[in-house]
Image (cartoon, rainbow, N blue to C red):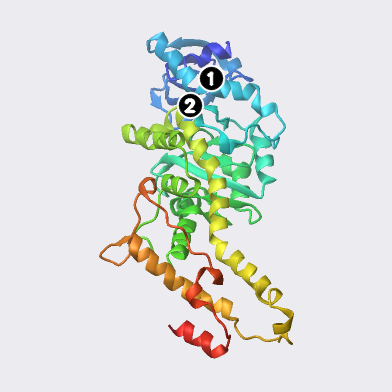
Amino acid sequence: MDASWLRALLGRRLRLALADGTYSGRLRHVDASSKAVVLHEVEDLENKQQLPGVKMFFGYEIQNLVILDDLPAASANEQANDGNGERSKLEGATPRKVFGEKHSPEYEKLEYEDLEYIIIDQFHEMFGPAIFHIKQQNVIGVALKGINVCRFGKLCWMQISTKYQIYCFDIFLLGAATFRNGLKMILEDSNILKVIHNCRLVSDCLYHQYQVDLTNVFDTQVADVMQFYKETGGLLPSCVSTLEECLVRHLSLSRTKIRSLQHCACALKVNPKVWSCRPPPQRLLQSAGMEVMLLLSLRTVLMDKLMMDFTTQVDNYMSMYRNIPNISFGYAEISSLELPYELMELTVIQKLRREDALKKYRTDEDGLLVRPYPHFENKPKERIINIDDIPELEITKTSREDGIEVQNE
């Protein structure tokens, strides 16, 4: 049997005659190296019994093959080219590159049509090198796709992005063995930071279905709320943000990439079980790959925003004594543990930020701030913690009593 000819039959129903029986099922996957075929909706024709799950039949076992349904040739070719053509190209080229080799151009500058990814749907050849490469990383992006992903749902895909590569693990095909053979070790490794958007259902699904205790997670949805809390001087938003909203708000995502990310949501509305379709639609996987890739950039931007007050205050700290003229310096009390006035400014800055936020955002019945969709949001210039930015609070005499009075206000 020719593997390329079999790929043209993906999605069609076949009858296989083996030495020990006859089976029918719908063709899901073809392994080019061993010429093995994977069928789902399998039926044992001799015993008239429906078999659960998927079954693999090796090429040397198959004595005869008959096509049972009569799909138009154009439709079969379209299905084969939709996802498996891309997989064939990657199986023939990408896995043989050195894992970790930097691609050009950088992923952050790619549109989804140019995005490269590696589909892992078998345990030999690509699975081991992929796990080895991911294990060497300090930070990875993680996303799950499936049917109602939770403890009761069906996990179909897990996307993992590193700095130089995107992997799509076919959990629907490989099953729990994917986690036993390496993914569990990675997801529970406290030395690898996992960047996830809304880890609640992800953690629930992995823990209850695959006994994976997710560890060391940076949740971009939580980080977005924390950044808003800091920006508004301690006020909370009325709701959390979707990944798309976070990417637009913090990465200024282009309209092309926004449309790409919306493709997944549109496909789910048409077919809620679209992630279980095999072969997978190429554009759907490209969109999912784009999401998990951008998680790494999103985490970097959010970390910078969350640390802005700290870094600014450290800059103020460094110049506190350094910029005092010699004649005024005298003998500084280096060992003094009193809270410097510069740090007391934090309460004043928070008050000013709250005032700005209440002017900018409307509030709901619970007193929470309602954020508009980031496309239509004119983001205000965030107040930076710097004494020079608050002329009305400039001081001529610093004392502990003055600092306490400002704090009480």
Which quadrant holds the N terminus? top right
Say which residue appears at 35% left-offset and 55% top-offset.
371
Amino acid under disc 1: Gly
Camera-side residue of 136 and 112? 112
- Is mark 2 in CB contact (under 8 Å) with mark 1? yes
Residue linked to disc 2: 282
Q: Position of residue 260 (x, y in %)?
A: 44, 34
Relative to residue 168, is residue 3 depicted above or below?
Answer: above
Please identify the quadrant where the C terminus is shown.
bottom left
In-image side of 179 versus 21 (left or right): right
**Residue 350 location (% of width, % of height):** 46, 71
Q: Quadrant of residue 15?
A: top left
Q: Which residue position holds label 1?
A: 85
The image quarter in which residue 306 lies: bottom right
User: In the figure, 221 relative to 53: above or below?
Assistant: below
The amino acid type, in three-letter code, at marker 2 is Gln
From the viewer's perspective, tell me whether residue 329 is left or right of residue 160.
Answer: right
